[in-house]
Image (spheres, helix red, strand yellow):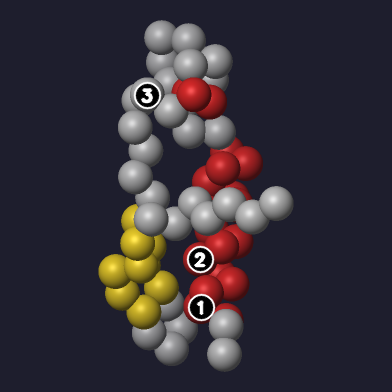
């Protein structure tokens, strides 16, 4: 399974990358995390950072 959490890369350099992830309050996973106070799950944040790092290190 492949899912790309990065919506757009806006800047790259030899040692950095700036990426955007748009999050909507309508996202299904936010309905239960936490009801009335939606928070992006930490595992989603980590996966987004891993994906950004892979793009930065790609040849």
12 relative to 53, above or below: below
Between disc 3 and disc 1, whose residue precedes? 3
For image coordinates 41% across by 73% down, the residue present is 17
Taking the spot 64% from the left edge, 55% from the top edge, the residue there is 2
Residue 25 picture location, percent across and down: 35, 25
Q: Relative to 32, does residue 25 appear above or below in the rendering?
A: below
Q: Of all residues shown, which one is farthest toward the right? A: 1
Q: Is residue 51 above or below residue 37?
A: below
Local packing at callout 1 (Cα closer than 10 Å; few below 14, some 14-19, many 20+) is some
Residue position marked by numbered label 3 in the rendering: 26
- Read off the residue under disc 1: 56
Mark 3 → mark 1, Cα distance in angstroms: 30 Å
* Mark before the other along the chain sequence, 2 or 3: 3
The residue lying at 37 percent from left, 24 percent from top is: 26
Question: What secondary structure is marked by label 2?
Answer: helix
Q: CB under 8 Å between callouts 1 and 2? A: yes
Callout 3: SS: loop
Q: Nearer the viewer, residue 37 or 55?
A: 55
- Mark 1 to mark 2: distance in Å? 6 Å
Indicate the position of residue 54 as horizontal and vertical percent values: 59, 72
Q: What mark, if any, has residue 8 been given in the picture?
A: none
Q: Position of residue 16 (x, y in %)?
A: 42, 77
Cα gap from disc 2 to disc 3, whole angstroms: 24 Å
Q: Viewed as shown, does residue 30 lie left or right of 13?
A: right
Secondary structure of residue under mark 1: helix
Q: Which residue is mark 2?
A: 52
Q: Measuring 56% from the left and 63% from the top, which residue is drawn there?
A: 51
Q: Is the residue marked by circle 2 packed among few (<14), some (14-19), or many (20+) residues within 10 Å?
A: many
Q: In the picture, which quadrant includes the C terminus?
A: bottom right
């Amino acid at each position: 399974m492949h899912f790309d959490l990065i919506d757009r890369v806006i800047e790259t350099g030899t040692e950095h990358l700036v990426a955007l992830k748009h999050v909507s309050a309508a996202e299904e996973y936010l309905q239960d995390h936490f009801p009335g106070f939606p928070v992006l799950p930490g595992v989603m944040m980590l996966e987004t950072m891993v994906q950004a790092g892979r793009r930065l290190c790609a040849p």
